[in-house]
Amino acid sequence: MTSSSRRCLALTSVLVLFASGLALPASTQPRASATGTLRLYLARHGQTDWNVEGRMQGGTDIPLNATGRKQAAALKDHLKGVRFDAVYSSTLSRSRETAEIVRGQVPLTSLPGLAERRFGKFEGLLSNAPDTGPEFERRRWDPKDALDGGESWVAFTDRVRSTLQTIRPKHPSGTILVVGHGGTNQAVLQIVFGLSIDDTRAITQANDELYLIELDATGAPRLWKLVTAENLRDL
């Protein structure tokens, strides 16, 4: 088994049932360790019209559509009873509005470092366009390819890593929510779990999917996933 396969297997082994639309019994809830645990709920923004059309959004500021606002309301309902110390979003409206709907009275901080990767000449184009789609898919995972005016994967993950490094010291323990983007959340998981590019590109988080990362002062991080009727096929 290759090292890449072992990392992928390790991630799969901790991608476990977190909820199924109902609260889990207390005995099965993730528990904090004696040394203190940060529980980082990692959500993706709700749906936008460009998501529906299959357009590459990147740094373009596209708002939520009606379905996206319903997804944000459903996320709020899923998280009912979870007491957050802070909520973070990107500065893009689709992320910020999702966080605003979910947060209640919890303070919200919008950080540019959590914004989606900038896709350069490909922003606004259809991902399945016959002339540019295959080129984008080929180039987007080349670590140093900045996509003609966008960001390389290396520059993007450096930005996300730097942002996480500003958030983490503020929350050595407790519970926070981060509302990111498809690419941003891939980068977060790559950074936290030490994934390869191949492992990272296999992660696809839908607009209504939720992850929970548990970070202890010592020990390996753990990943949980909200399982609903829509994504039972992932089990």
Image: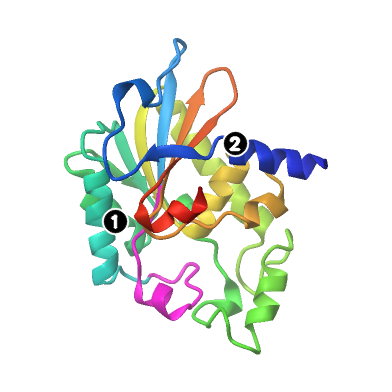
**What residue appears at the point 47 percent right and 77 percent down from the top-left corner?**
54
Position of residue 196 in the picture relative to residue 128 (left or right):
right
Asked if the magenta segment contains residue 47, the reply would be yes
Q: Which image quarter: residue 87?
A: top left
Q: Is residue 160 above or below residue 124?
A: above
Percent position of residue 72, x then y:
27, 56
Residue 98 — which label? 1
Asked if the magenta segment contains residue 17, the reply would be no
* Towards the viewer: 80 or 168: 80
Q: Is residue 135 above or below residue 89?
A: below
* Towards the viewer: 6 or 158: 6
**What residue appears at the point 61 percent right and 50 percent down from the top-left corner?**
157
Amino acid type assigned to the residue bearing label 1 in the image = Thr
- Number of numbered discs visible in the structure rendering: 2
Magenta stretch, main secondary structure class: loop
Q: Which image quarter: residue 3?
A: top right
- Is residue 172 visible in the rendered image? The answer is no
The outermost residue toward the bottom is 131
Q: Which residues are magenta?
A: 43-61
Percent position of residue 173, x then y:
40, 22
Where disc 1 sits, the SS reads helix
Q: CA distance from mark 1 to mark 2?
A: 29 Å
Where disc 2 sits, the SS reads helix
The first of marks 1 and 2 along the sequence is 2
Name the residue tied to disc 2.
13
| Quadrant that contains the N terminus | top right
Quick one: label 2, few (<14), some, or many (20+) residues within 10 Å? few
Percent position of residue 22, x then y:
26, 40
